[in-house]
Image: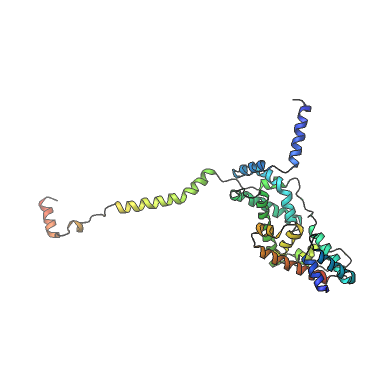
Amino acid sequence: MSVTTLRPVVLIDMQRAAQPAEPAAELEWIEASKRGDGDAFGRLVRQHQQRVFRLAGRFFRRREDVEDVAQETFLTAWRKLDTYAARAPFEHWLSRICLRLCYARLRRKRPDESAELREVAAGRPDPDAGLDVERLLAHLAPADRMVLVLLDGEGWSTAEIARRLGWTRVNVKVRAHRARARLRKLVEQELPR
Amino acid sequence: MSCRDFRELLSRISGPARGSDDQAALARHLEQCDDCARFARRWHELRRGLRRSPAVTPDAGFAARVVARLPAPPDPLSWAALRLLPASVALVLALTGWCLLATPPPTTVADELAGGDLLTWVAAGEESGR
């Protein structure tokens, strides 16, 4: 077979690789992964890694933290693949795992308040500098921060957050209200005079 | 509208869905309050910061690193054996119980003598050359 006849096929494959997987292909990868096919699972990882990184990156700014959470998300997914019944998109199932891991990590950091977080929260604001969002968010309780970031950062609805986190809608609303009230106070305190 | 009301309203409602009445009230207050104008600028800055996409992205080797950490899939045979374990234990217990119930109790000299007398039994033994 000549090179000229191969080229269109290669081009089509490259285009396919850049596009999101079709649900049928994804289901095949999932089924193969359930049978222990690591290569198929690798394709699932490549398919969803951007979203998982983006989600974890909303809560942690250090690359090591984000990568740890992302790796743990996929490893947990591999262990629990048997429980995925394909009633909801795989992406939703994966994001639920990722969010739970983020939340657990945020809560774990809380008691001993890792040095970085403490530093961030205690940093003195520079009235002339731009707003340091990370420093303000560090003042919030993990659950409040999570809700606010998903609402305002990811643009999810209250119902969606409740569904993905397994919380009630009232709980989500209360936490959002509390987070905004706290941030409002912090912004007021730091208003340049 | 007081400054407190303005700030609460601004932080509670967000995005383009804000009602026109609220918009008008916020705008009226903004025109006459420099402090709240500064607050509004900071608040919008905060919301923009929240919406900004995180900078960390996966590198080219991420998927390979995950796949390298995957635990080996369980051996289907050993998994099947493990699933049959409770049934196997129940079967062994049932068989043991059945054996215990079905086996007649051992007979002893005392049982053989039930209703008789030891001396008669010995004498009978001697006569028969026991």
The quarter in which the C terminus of chain A is drawn is: bottom right
Q: Position of residue A91 (x, y in %)?
A: 68, 50
Q: Which of B126 and B21 is in front in this view?
A: B21
Could you tell whether A160 is left or right of B92 in the image? Answer: right
Q: Where is residue A11 in the image (x, y as percent from the top left)?
A: 77, 35
Residue A132 shows up from this direction:
no
Residue B80 shows up from this direction:
yes
Q: Where is residue A81 in the image (x, y as percent from the top left)?
A: 61, 49
Picture quadrant where residue A160 is located? bottom right
The quarter in which the N terminus of chain A is drawn is: top right
Q: Position of residue A110 (x, y in %)?
A: 70, 66
Picture quadrant where residue B14 is located? bottom right
Q: Which residue is drawn at 76% across and 37% down?
A: A14
Q: Which residue is drawn at 74% across and 60% down?
A: A151
Figure disc tally: 0
Could you tell whether A135 is left or right of A43 in the image? Answer: right
Vertical comparison of B64 with A57: above or below = above
- Which residue occupies the extreme top position in the image? A1
Q: Residue at x 51, y 43 (%)?
A: B77
* Colour pattern of the rendering: rainbow
Picture quadrant where residue A6 is located? top right
Q: Which of A15 and A100 is in front in this view?
A: A15
- Which residue occupies the extreme left position in the image? B127
